[in-house]
Image (cartoon, rainbow, N blue to C red):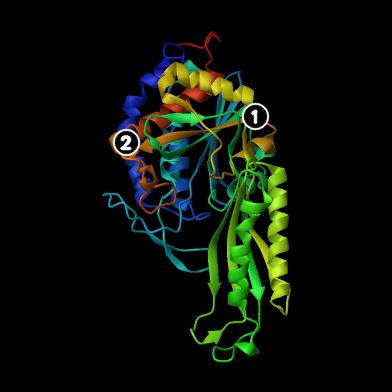
Amino acid sequence: MPNGPLRPLLDAVDGVLPETRDFYTDLHAHPELSNQEHRTAALAAARLADAGFEVTTGVGTTGVVGVLRNGDGPTVALRADMDALPVREATGLPYASTVTATDADGAETPVGHACGHDVHVAWLAAAAALFGAHRDAWSGTLVALFQPAEETGTGARAMVDDGLVARFPTPDVVLGQHVMPAPAGIVATRPGTATSASDVWRIRMFGRGAHGSMPEAAIDPVVMAASTVVRLQTVVSRELGMNEAAVLTIGVLQAGSKENVIPDEATIGLNLRCYDEGVRARAQDAIRRIVAAEARAAGAPREPEITPVETYQVTDNDPTATDRVLTALRDHLGADRVASMGPASASEDFGELGRAWGAPSVFWFVGGVDHATYDTLAREGRLAELPTNHSPLFAPVLDPTVRTGIETLVTAAGAWLAPEGDGAAG
């Protein structure tokens, strides 16, 4: 691949790096919540138009789809997510976010790109520009998708529901990538399960309120919820086998507003992550059983309410397509920069796109941590201190993260659009 038909695009990466860095830092300083990505979408659409793409905006709320037709050949879809998180950034960077916004519940919240979607947008915009500027080096059709609302697990489905499959060319492969807290310049993926399934549930448990001095007059939902939280810890530790991976996290436990008032309800918010659908179904059943049983044991006047809030399916990398991507990446980056990995515990809605189109998909990870920092923490046994995605301290280092993400998108897409020996001009 280094000496193949994609050489003109890869040689041109140096030329787009300054503008891509500037675009990334601008996006980082101006994050937008899920389904509010209006500025980001407009900037992405403008860059696609400048590169010669046919551009459609407003797909699934704020999604952007660009299509670049360049003769006969395969169709490749590249996806980047755009949304930020309700997180107050604490990186101290000169381009750190100070943005606040109104969330879906009407509350004012700080907003930060604590997951790296800003660099995903910058990567794809740069790759699209390179494909647009060097059409003699490849043939086929390139579809660039800038997706909203990945953080709520609704964005890919919203684009599908808005006619994605019928309105745009069907790809031979769907490709995506994500920055992670690994050494910058390193990429990693695997065939099969790449990221976990995830379920976020909101549980309301009902009691009977009373004065704090008269607990006998109450059915205390605080105690009910506390007992439920403790019992839920046994779902993974006592109901699943040692080879059946799952994580169950209670991230929300809310009840009451005054110390001497027993409230009449409590709320639990939980997150379940699994790699296997059978394990997922058993864990869900156990959660429902425990919640209902604890409410009955407490004499609750009403059955608990369980409301699904977010759902992500397993991201499943097609083995044949993954092998093709890995071969291309190793040829260009070198085998020492392409790592194998186990399934990631994070979750993604990227797989919705390939499933909707009936196309194979491949998802990989790009490191974004300064090598010296990573090596020092690893040597001292302190890698747990490394800020991860969703941390207020998370932000990819500019170099070589920006360059690597551009090169991986170009190289992986080129494995279909400009394979060795296909006669494309070099």
User: In this orientation, which residue lies closer to the viewer: 218 or 27?
Assistant: 218
Left or right position of 52 against 286: left
Residue at the location (73% across, 76% down)? 302
Image quadrant assignment for residue 89: bottom left
Where residue 223 appears, as percent x and y from the top left, is: 59, 75
Q: Amino acid at mark 2?
A: Arg
Where residue 325 appears, as percent x and y from the top left, is: 54, 23
User: Residues under labels 1 and 2: Cα distance?
Assistant: 39 Å
Q: Amino acid at mark 1?
A: Pro
Look at discs 1 and 2 and give the one toward the viewer: 2
Left or right position of 317 against 177: right
Dot 1, crowdedness within 10 Å: few (<14), some or many (≥20)?
A: many
Residue beneath label 1, please? 360
Left or right position of 238 against 256: right
Residue beneath label 2, please? 379
Residue 215 is at least partly visible in this image: yes
Mark 2 falls on what kind of element? helix
Residue at the location (56% across, 29% down)? 190
Residue at the location (46% across, 19% down)? 330
Mark 1 falls on what kind of element? loop
User: In this orientation, which residue lies closer to the viewer: 156 or 236?
Assistant: 236
Mark 1 vs mark 2: which is more N-terminal? Answer: 1
Where residue 7 appears, as percent x and y from the top left, is: 41, 15
Dot 2, crowdedness within 10 Å: few (<14), some or many (≥20)?
A: few
Relative height, residue 21 to residue 330 (above, below)? below
Left or right position of 298 against 190: right
Q: Quadrant of the C terminus?
A: top left
Where residue 15 appears, as percent x and y from the top left, is: 32, 26
Residue 180, label in figure: none
User: In this orientation, which residue lies closer to the viewer: 94 or 44?
Assistant: 94
